Image (cartoon, coloured by chain):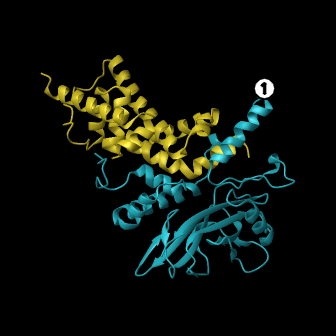
Amino acid sequence: MSRTNSIGELYRSHGAAVLRRARRLLANEADAQELLQEVFTTLLRDPQPLIRARSAMALLYTITTNRALNRIRNEQNRRRLLHLAPEAAPAPTPAAPPDTHDDLRTILRLLPEQEAAAFVYRHVDGMTHAEIADLLGCSRRHVATLLDRSRERLLSHEHAP
Amino acid sequence: MTNLHDRAHDCISDLLLDQMCAGEPVSPHVRAHVDACEPCRDRLAAIVREAARFRQAELPPWLEARPRRTGVRPLVAAASLLAVASLLWLVRGPVPGERADDAIRLKGGGALTVYVRQAERTFVAAPGAHVHPGDALRLALSTPEPAWVAVFGRDATGRWSTYHPMGDLAEPLSAGSEQLLDMALELDAELGEETFVAVFCTGPTDVEAIRSVIMETFPILAYPPGCHAASLTLEKTP
């Protein structure tokens, strides 16, 4: 079996989940399809992460989430660089989960990388702290810290003048 | 605007449902929750249907075979490929006497769907779904292009049965989605894992040849050249 065929089989068995996740986070079909391709071509070039992973699905969730968040950040950075930043929107109340993709984008604009990932796993996916710890490769205590920090950051932004 | 939430907070995450759907191991309490929770069963059924549709689509061109790169040290490359293959749940393994380059991969993938009739309800079984003695099963096959098919089962005692076809050669199946086989099964009292394997071949392959290769290589599952397979394992509980 060649590497292409192996990743092809993985694409068949796991691709639907990657595409659904990309659609959920990016809310744009063209971007989601691009991300799907990006995730699997990355593994075609370097399958080492798959070899080390305990769960191929968990690995694909992590890669898809990280790359989706990067895309959102890059899009925001491009807008900033081109002085096309949208009008500042108030952050959603952190006690409540994000209800729309616009809310999610606003939140991701305010949070550092790891906090943003933890926030998505907790409030978009509803994962337990144990599941998040597994995906982020850290302890449950650290997950709780990340979520606390993200909550404080969003609260302080909400109360900023 | 799309609402991002589609489940109750005490239900299990999509990640776990996706792992179940892809045949990855999940803990017994996750399976127990899905069995007992109607919304989660519905979500899992939707994920299984979505995955089946996805599998039937053509592989995108960027995943098709590419010319080999030169300069890769053969031993390192071979080790990487073996390790990748061992991670995948369904792999087409080596067949004695066959070189890897001889392998024929069907374009598009066949899929196996198992319908379970349990008391008054009928549902599509996800990998690891709990079934019970007396449940009735119907099997359906999907293939994006015509194929020759055979279906086998392995019960908890390790006994293999040929469910389809009755003849010596794999039977032709036209392209189509979820084509029900003309047969139904009633589960016996033997508890444990029940595995179903549907094999899709590019030609009229000998059923016994397929069966012997599968039996010898289970649970890795290797197939004769020109064939590939879809499989599903259910958990039969009291």
Residue shown at 45% from the left, 57% from the top:
B47
Q: Chain B is drawn in which colour?
A: cyan
Residue under label 1, please give it.
Answer: B71
| Callout 1: SS | loop
B230 to the left or right of A145: right
Q: What residue type is labelled 1?
A: Gly
Q: For residue B175, what is the image quadrant?
A: bottom right
- Front residue of B189/B195: it is B189
> Dividing the image into 4 quarters, which one contains the N terminus of chain B?
top left
Q: Which residue lies furthest to the right in this view?
A: B97
Q: Chain A is drawn in which colour?
A: yellow
Residue shown at 58% from the left, 58% from the top:
B56
The percent coordinates of residue B6 (x first, y second) are 31, 54
The percent coordinates of residue A30 (x first, y second) are 46, 40
Query: Relative to A74, does residue B204 appear above or below in the rendering?
Result: below
Q: For residue B143, what is the image quadrant?
A: bottom right
